[in-house]
Image (cartoon, rainbow, N blue to C red):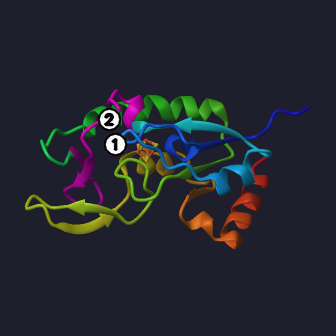
Amino acid sequence: MAPKPRLGISRCLLGHRVRYDGGHKHDPHLISRLEQQVAFVPVCPEVECGLPVPREPLRLMGGPECPRLVTIRTGRDFTDRMAGWASRRLAELQEADLCGYIFKAGSPSCGMRGVKVYDAGGACSERGAGLFAMAFTKRFPLLPVEEEDRLQDPRLLEGFIERLKGRV
Ligand code: SF4
């Protein structure tokens, strides 16, 4: 039997307890629709770059083009750590020959769009993309990618699956 195509996915969507609060964001409908057809490649940028579970939550700060990844309460800046890890991990994912990727919406690491970006005064001034999602889509601009919240729409989900089939 031919191996299943590999689909990258934000790890918390599979039910792994990797979120800042020790929880997950399991999406049983989405996972059950896809798991017969693909082999998931789970990625949690925040845990894989060395942050613990639980951990202080992060947010984006600065401008949407080049935001920084900073802890909300203590202001620790993990931008460079995330960028260094992402560069290595993206090289691995290139080898994995993914057919696509599903990102967790709204995350300062995984969100593809509309993630809040705060100014120095603590106000949400802009919206942008999470650091890993931004690096991923820059590295693999032609790969089908989606956020899990949009895939709640059956029409968008089936369209995404068709795009995945076009890659295998
Ligand atoms: S959204 Fe991304 S960084 Fe946050 S817990 Fe899920 S996989 Fe990890």
The residue at 66%/69% (across/down) is 156
Q: Circle 2: is it few (<14), some (14-19), or many (20+) Cα within 10 Å?
A: some
Q: Position of residue 139 (x, y in %)?
A: 50, 45
Disc 2 target residue: 54
Note whether ligand 1 is within 8 Å of mark 1.
no
SS at circle 2: loop
Q: Residue furthest right?
A: 1
Q: Are marks 1 and 2 in contact (CB under 8 Å)?
A: yes
Q: Position of residue 164 (x, y in %)?
A: 73, 54
The residue at 38%/38% (across/down) is 22
SS at circle 1: loop
Considering the whole magenta stretch, tell me its main secondary structure. loop
Q: Where, quadrant-wise, is the N terminus in this rendering?
A: top right
Q: Is residue 12 above or below residue 33?
A: above
Q: Is residue 68 magenta?
A: yes
Note whether ligand 1 is within 8 Å of mark 2.
no
Give the quadrant of residue 23.
top left
The residue at 79%/45% (across/down) is 36
Q: Position of residue 14 (x, y in %)?
A: 58, 43
The amino acid type of the residue labelled 1 equals: Asp
Q: Is residue 167 magenta?
A: no
As measured in the structure, the alpha-carbon distance from the residue carrying label 1 to the one carrying label 2 is: 5 Å
Q: What's the magenta region?
A: 46-70
Left or right: 116 in relation to 89: left
The amino acid type of the residue labelled 2 equals: Pro
Q: Quadrant location of ligand 1?
A: top left
Disc 1 target residue: 21
Pick the residue in front: 106 or 55: 55
Left or right: 151 in relation to 22: right
- Residue 109 marker: none
